[in-house]
Image (cartoon, rainbow, N blue to C red):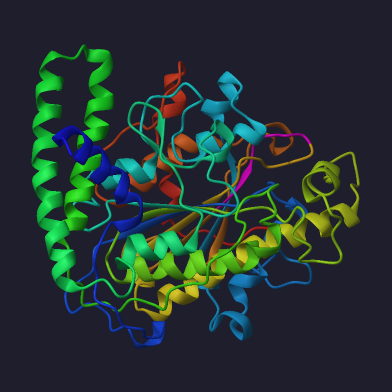
Amino acid sequence: MTAQRSRRAFLAALGVSGGFLAWETRGFAELAPAATPAPRRYIGVYTPHGRAHELWQPRAGFDIAYAGSTLAPFDDAANYGKSFRQHLLVLDGVDLSAGIEVGTTGHDGSRVILTGSGADGRNASLDQFLALEHGLGSETSHTSLTLGVGSDSTEVGQNLSWSRGGTPVPKWIDPSRVHAELFGAPLGVRQEELLHERRAGKSLLDRVRADLARLSRRAPASERTKLEQHATALRDIEKRLTHVEQSCAAPAAPPGFEKLRAFGGGEPYFDAITDLQVDLLARAISCDLTRVATLYLADLTRSKLFVQLPEDVHQEVAHRYDARDDVHAGTPHSWEQLALQNRYSYGKVARLLRRLDEAGALDTTLVHTSSDMGDPARHSSRQVPTLLIAGGAFGLATGRYLDLRHGKNLQEGVPNNHLLVSLARLYGAEVERFGESKNASLLGGHLDDLAARHSAAS
């Protein structure tokens, strides 16, 4: 086999053989917190179909457990081990402004959530900025982790994570693959075989890196971003090859699923797949295999999880949501149906919080959830439902509702770029702006109120 072919074979094999860890099964509650202070972690979560605002807003006294509340899972100790109400900061009035400016809205809005840029943006999303440019992922075997349920598409409206240059970061949607990538090669592979593969892999990496260096010296500026991305991928591979032993135990391997994709027969398995993805993500964070991750949740269309919902949640629930406003009473039944979808998604986030808490990792983790729309019937990317769930290490004033809406009838919000600046600063990044827009006022600024005490509103 030629060197060129062997390199291709090696790189192709990385999709199924990255990382080698000790095998052992242990429960989350048995994982002891690290002896030294843990670094801060970031998890971004996409939830589908906007929100039923009438049942999403907390009520007086920061009541999130009233009948029908979509936020109820965060105050449900019976199902999630404890209440996470005091960890929760509800932000009302966050607009995907840079996307609205160029028409990247509605179902394409997920492109804007973590980038603060429209479809033609070239900057990295917040997770990739923290992991690579800010160095949060430099010491872990996986620089970042991008997971999803139901769709591994990298289309504009299907992705949260974007690398510098505007390239989408693919999602892993198969729990079996996630387990293998995080916790090693299949059982039965002998240690000496793994060591041989590591030595061969590192040798090939040295040669590929040299090739890239030669290309970079000759390549035009327009191509250097792509070469930088290849170099970053190689560094990530090298870390996986050198991080052979981990003190943190591997969970049991998940079952395989015959079908995984939406509109491809995977819908009946989404609930089980989501639970597995959540548990693997929490284990990866608590084992310090990664400190940065995103999770893209699927909707309930064709999943038949709730008899109260029609077959097509997208068309028959999200598109039929009828909001209440100053002149229109709205349709409560439409709120209740959309709230089921919202509450389901937040239940999975609450499960993630429980797993992190059981492993002693919640205090140093911030979970940031959002959606591509506020009102899904209007495909509006204004007032997208935004939650920050943070441990004490971040100094946020949690356990409250912060209304950022203003203007006539409270129809204007703040650009999500300001939130992204504020979040980057929480991790020590000295940034004044985040994202791309022709309107510089969208990009600069931050939310001082995140750390200020305010009385709960309703």
The reply to whether the magenta stretch includes residue 190 is no
Displayed quadrant of residue 455: bottom right
Residue 95 in picture, x, y percent from top left: 58, 36
Q: Residue 421 occupies which quadrant of the picture?
A: top left
**Residue at position x 9%, y 56% from top?**
199
Q: Position of residue 163 (x, y in %)?
A: 35, 35
Q: State the residue lying farthest toward the top.
A: 220
Magenta portion: prevailing SS class: loop
The picture places residue 122, in percent across and down from the top left corner, at 38, 24
| 308 vs 83, nearest the viewer | 308
Residue 177 or residue 2, whichever sits in front: 2
Q: Is residue 86 above or below residue 149?
A: below
Q: Residue at (23%, 48%) from the top-left corner?
A: 236
Q: Residue at x 89, y 55 (%)?
A: 332
Q: Can residue 350 be seen in this snapshot?
A: yes
Q: Nearer the viewer, residue 290 or 259?
A: 259
Instruction: Give the residues in magenta.
Output: 378-386
